[in-house]
Image (tube, rainbow, N blue to C red):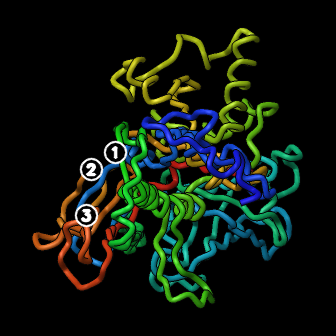
Amino acid sequence: MANVSPAFGSLIPTQKKQALEGNYLNFTDGTNDFAQQYLPEIYEAEVERYGNRTLSGFLRMVGAEMPMTSDQVVWSEQNRLHISYENVIATNAGAVGAKVSTLTIPVGGAGATLIQNVVSPGSTIVVMNPATGAELNCYVVASGATPGSALGAGVLTVAPYSQEALDGTGAGAAEIDLVTGGPALKIFVYGSEYGKGTGDANRISVTPSFTQYSNSPIIIKDKYAINGSDTAQIGWVEVATESGQGGFLWYLKAESETRLRFEDYLEMSMVEGELKSGTSTTTAKGTEGLFAAVKSRGNVLVDFTAATGLAQFDSILKNLDTQGAIEENMLFLNRETSLDFDDMLATVGQQGGTGIYQGGSSYGVFENSEEMALNLGFSGFRRGSYDFYKTDWKYLNDASTRGGVADAGIEGVLVPAGTSTVYDQILGTNIRRPFLHVRYRASQADDRRMKNWITGSVGGAATSDLDAMEVHFLSERCLVTQAANNFVLFTD
C-alpha cells in the first residue's frame, strides 16, 4: 500500500466519468506512470501513408481478357514477304576478276528455325556489306535449291552486273570483292531476268510459311483465414480502400487487402512470368510473361538517357520502320525514364523543334480527347510518322516491387496500340485481337477468371468442422503477346 497515492482511504469515487484530483491511482514503482490509468487515445481513421497501393490496371488499359478451354493457347504470326538472307559467305575459287563467284547461304535447322534456300536461277539480287555500306547487283546463274543441281543446298553461283567489283578496280569502300575470307554479307532478291523464248523449269515455287507460338496458363492462388474466436473481438477501423470505397471495417479488412493483393498478382504474374527452360530443376512449368516475350522476340533498348535521348529515340523509330510500323504506341515508364523523356522533349522544344512538339499533342488512341488521355495520366507527342502516349507505370515505381532500386533492370516498355490479325487454331479463322491480351480458363461448368469461395464454420460458412473462416482466391490464366517485334523494352 506504500506505493498508492493518495493514501489509502482518501480515494473518493465519483458518480460520473470524470478525471478529478481525488479519484486516480498513481503508480510510482518505476514501471508505470500517471498516464497509464487512462484509456489510450485511439484514432479510428487509418492513416493512408502509402496512398493507393494497388499496382494492377496496366493490362486493363492496353489489352483484353478472353476465355479458353485448353491447356495451351496457340497462335500463328506471318513471316516477311520478301526473300533475304544474312550472314552470307562469299567464296571465289579463281583469281580476283573471275567472271562468277559463289555465295553460301546458312541453311538448316528445324521447325521455326528452319532456313531454306529459295533463290531461283535467273533471280536478280543485291549483295550488301553491312560493315561498309558497299553493295553489288548480281545475276543468279545457278542455285543449289534447284532439283538435280550439283551445288550444295545453300550455294548460289552469281555473276555481278559490274565486273569492277571483282577485279579490284572499284572505288575503295564502294567495292565488294567476292573472294574467300570476305565479310558476312546480306542479300535480297529484287526481281529476275530471262532471255527470249526461255522457260521457267528451274523456277522455285516459294510456299509462304508462318511462325507458330504458344503459351500455357498457370494457376494462381491465395487465401485469408481467421479463427472463430478472433471474429468476436470486433475492432472497428475507418478506411478508404483502393477501390474508392470508404467506411468502417472490422476483421474483414484483412480479407479486403488479401483480395487487392491477389488482383495485383494476377497482373504481375502476366508481366513477370517466365517459362521453365534449360537445366532448371523446378517442377513448375511457368508461363511466358510480357518481359520474357519482348526479350525473346522483341526489341531491347539499353540505357536510355536524356543526354542522348533524341538520337536513341530516333533509333527506335528506324527499327519500328523495319518491323510492323504501328502508328500509335504507348510508353509505360518508371520515374527516371519518364523524366528523361520530358528532358528530351523540352530540349527539342527550346531549340525550336524539328517535329516533336510541332502541331501540339496528339490523342488519337483516346478518340482524340485530351481530357480522356490526361485522366489516364497520358501525354502525347509525335515524332516522324508515329504518335506516342507517355505515362508513368506505377508497377515500376513502387518500392515493394521494382521501384526504389538504382538498377531495377526494367525501366519501361513501348506497347503498340490497336489490334492485330492472327489465325486462331481453335476457330479456324482469322481474328482480330489486341497485341496484349489475357486468356483464362472457363467453361459452362467452371469460370476460372477470378474464383472466390468461403470454407469453414465461421462467417456464414458451413462446409467443415474447422473453427475458422477461410476465404479462397483462384485464377488460371496466361498472357498472349502477339507481334512482339513491335514492342520495345527499356532496360538499364
In the rendered image, which quarter contains the N terminus?
bottom right
Marks 2 and 1 in Cβ contact (< 8 Å): yes
Image spot of residue 413 (x, y percent): 57, 46
Residue that sits furthest to the front in the current view: 9
Q: Which mark is residue 432?
A: 2
Label 1, label 3: how far apart the Cα atoms are: 14 Å
Residue holding disc 1: 419
Q: Earlier in the sequence, mark 1 or mark 3?
A: 1
Amino acid under disc 1: Thr
Q: Nearer the viewer, residue 301 or 444?
A: 444
Amino acid under disc 2: Arg
Residue holding disc 3: 424
Q: Nearer the viewer, residue 128 or 219?
A: 219
Q: Is residue 266 above or below residue 109?
A: above
Image spot of residue 396 (x, y percent): 61, 47
Q: Earlier in the sequence, mark 2 or mark 3?
A: 3
